[in-house]
């Protein structure tokens, strides 16, 4: 779980992965602070949170828990894509949501993002709605997965 001290590294990672859609450092400082509601997970290069230096972030994702949980973000460094990290990260985020009592998990995905849609569809998410112009340059497909056991 990325500690608060990684907010700068998280913002830099996010900017590389999402460009103009990235969250600013102020949002990451809040999201990684104690008491924030979201659950964030990262795959890192190095010794993880116990290392003295901030490690390289390879993948970063977060989920807002609750009965209707929501995947907030999921991204993998470009040079690490296609090796299973995105799928593992999504599995871990869904598991965290289930542990916190989720019955359904929602997410928004760019309608034109074939790779991300393939990732979600392959893991049981189904399209349930469309949010027009949710992104500056694209619609968002709303997807849902029932996780009740
Ligand atoms: C989408 C993203 C998170 C996928 O991460 P990844 O580490 O490359 O994904 P994985 O290697 O774990 O692949 C997971 C599954 O998605 C599928 N997939 C991933 N990228 C794909 C692509 N470009 N085209 C087709 N399928 C793709 C894989 O086939 C794989 O299926 P499997 O688990 O059945 O083998 C990554 O490409 C990324 O960070 N993209 C930019 C940010 C983004 O769009 N995030 C999602 C925002 S909603």
Image (cartoon, rainbow, N blue to C red):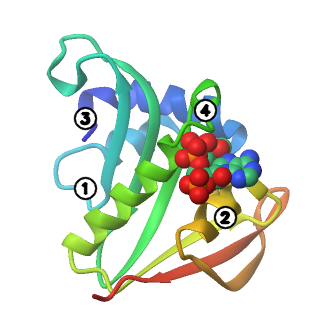
Sequence-first disc among 3 and 2: 3
Numbered circle sitting on residue 57: none
Of labels 3 and 2, the one closer to you: 2
Q: Give the vertical position of 33 relative to 81 (above or below).
A: below
| Residue bearing the label numbered 2 | 109
Q: Which residue is mark 3?
A: 4
Tell me whether circle 3 and circle 2 mark residues in contact (CB < 8 Å): no
How packed is label 3: few (under 14 Cα within 10 Å), some, or many (20 or more)? some
Residue pointed to by mark 4: 15
Q: Residue at x 60, y 67 (%)?
A: 122
Q: Earlier in the sequence, mark 2 or mark 1?
A: 1
**Residue 113 to residue 50: above or below:** below
Query: Going 25% across and 56% down the picture, which residue do you hit?
Result: 36
Residue 47: name its quadrant: top left
Label 2 and label 4: CA atoms lie apart by 17 Å
The alpha-carbon separation of the residues under discs 3 and 1 comes to: 10 Å
Hey, which quadrant is residue 121 in on the image?
bottom right
Residue in front for this viewpoint, 77 or 54:
77
Task: Mark 2 vs mark 1: give the one in front.
Answer: 2
């Amino acid at each position: 779980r990325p500690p608060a001290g990684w907010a700068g590294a998280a913002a830099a990672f996010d900017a590389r992965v999402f460009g103009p859609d990235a969250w600013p450092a102020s949002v990451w400082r809040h999201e990684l602070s104690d008491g924030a509601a979201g659950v964030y997970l990262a795959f890192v290069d190095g010794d993880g949170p116990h290392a003295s230096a901030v490690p390289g972030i390879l993948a970063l994702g977060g989920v807002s828990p609750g009965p209707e949980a929501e995947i907030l973000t999921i991204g993998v460094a470009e040079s690490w894509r296609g090796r299973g990290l995105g799928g593992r990260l999504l599995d871990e985020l869904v598991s965290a949501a289930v542990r916190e009592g989720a019955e359904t998990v929602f997410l928004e995905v760019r309608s034109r993002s074939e790779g991300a849609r393939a990732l979600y569809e392959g893991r049981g998410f189904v399209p349930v709605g469309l949010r027009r112009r949710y992104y500056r340059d694209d619609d968002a497909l709303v997807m849902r997965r029932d996780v009740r056991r």
